[in-house]
Image (tube, helix red, strand yellow):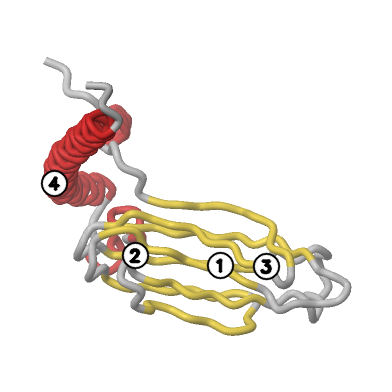
Amino acid sequence: MAFPSRDACRRLHVVLVAMLLGFRPSCSVRFDLQSGHTRCIGEDMRASAMSVGKFAIVNPHDGHPLPETHKLSVRVTSPHGNNYHQSENVESGQFAFTVAEAGDYTACFWAPDHNPQATMTVDFDWRTGMAAKDWSNVAKKGQVDGMELELKKLYETIDSIHNEMFYLREREEEMQELNQATNTKMAWLSCLSLFVCLSVAGLQLWHLKTFFEKKKII
């Protein structure tokens, strides 16, 4: 019986990870930011997940320093408005934190106003969960070989998927409770609307009957 080679195992591991990972582990974008404007990027995160981010202004002229107009400010906030990172008038930077509040986190970039208006290109790499872990440092510190490192990655991936499934189930329960509460309110509103319509119709009939009796039509 022939055993699969190490390369075959690695390819199988990549396929398994690609099949199992149904969530987006990172957000790497490049966008243009005009002076005097703001650009925000959101990321849905679960509690206790690790999050790291790096941002930098792309130099429009290689070999030359960035223009004085190419400065930006960054603020990362939680779903409840708590600040997790803030930088003012910088060319690049990075941040890292452990998520305490599950939900949508927002990273907002803005540039000081200039006349004439300046446009800068920003590289932003935002990673959460498994993607936020530096596996090269893990291999160096733990002195593990390639196969052990792959197994560690696979274990961490499965654990992350397990936690992600629980988080998604909690979000689904919250949505079901919200839908049920909305349906209950809509039912009460429909009953109230029907009661008001019947009351108005009854008042109109009573008014017409009284009017016709006064006119001695009926």
Q: Is residue 50 visible?
A: yes
Disc 2/disc 4 C-alpha distance (Å)? 33 Å
**Residue hosting label 3:** 37
Q: Earlier in the sequence, mark 2 or mark 4?
A: 2
> Could you say which disc has been placed on residue 120 in the image?
none
Q: Inspect the image, locate mark 2, and give the three-letter code of the amino acid beneath it.
A: Ser
Residue, disc 4: 181
- Amino acid type assigned to the residue bearing label 4 in the image: Ala
Q: Is residue 148 visible?
A: no
Secondary structure found at label 2 = strand
Relative to 12, say whether 100 is above or below.
Answer: below
- Check contact, mark 3 vs mark 1: CB within 8 A: no
- Which of 113/107 is in front? 113
For label 1, the residue is 55
How far separated are the C-alphas under marks 1 and 4?
A: 42 Å
Circle 3: is it few (<14), some (14-19), or many (20+) Cα within 10 Å?
Answer: few
- CB atoms at circles 3 and 4 under 8 Å apart? no
Q: Is residue 79 above or below residue 172?
A: below
> Which residue is rendered at x = 86% and y = 76% of the image?
115
Q: Nearer the viewer, mark 3 or mark 4?
A: 4
Q: Which residue matches tag 2?
A: 51
Q: How many neighbours does mark 2 have within 10 angstroms: few (below 14), some (14-19), or many (20 or more)?
A: many
Q: Are marks 2 and 3 in contact (CB under 8 Å)?
A: no
Give the Cα distance between marks 2 and 3: 26 Å
Q: Position of residue 177 (x, y in %)?
A: 11, 46
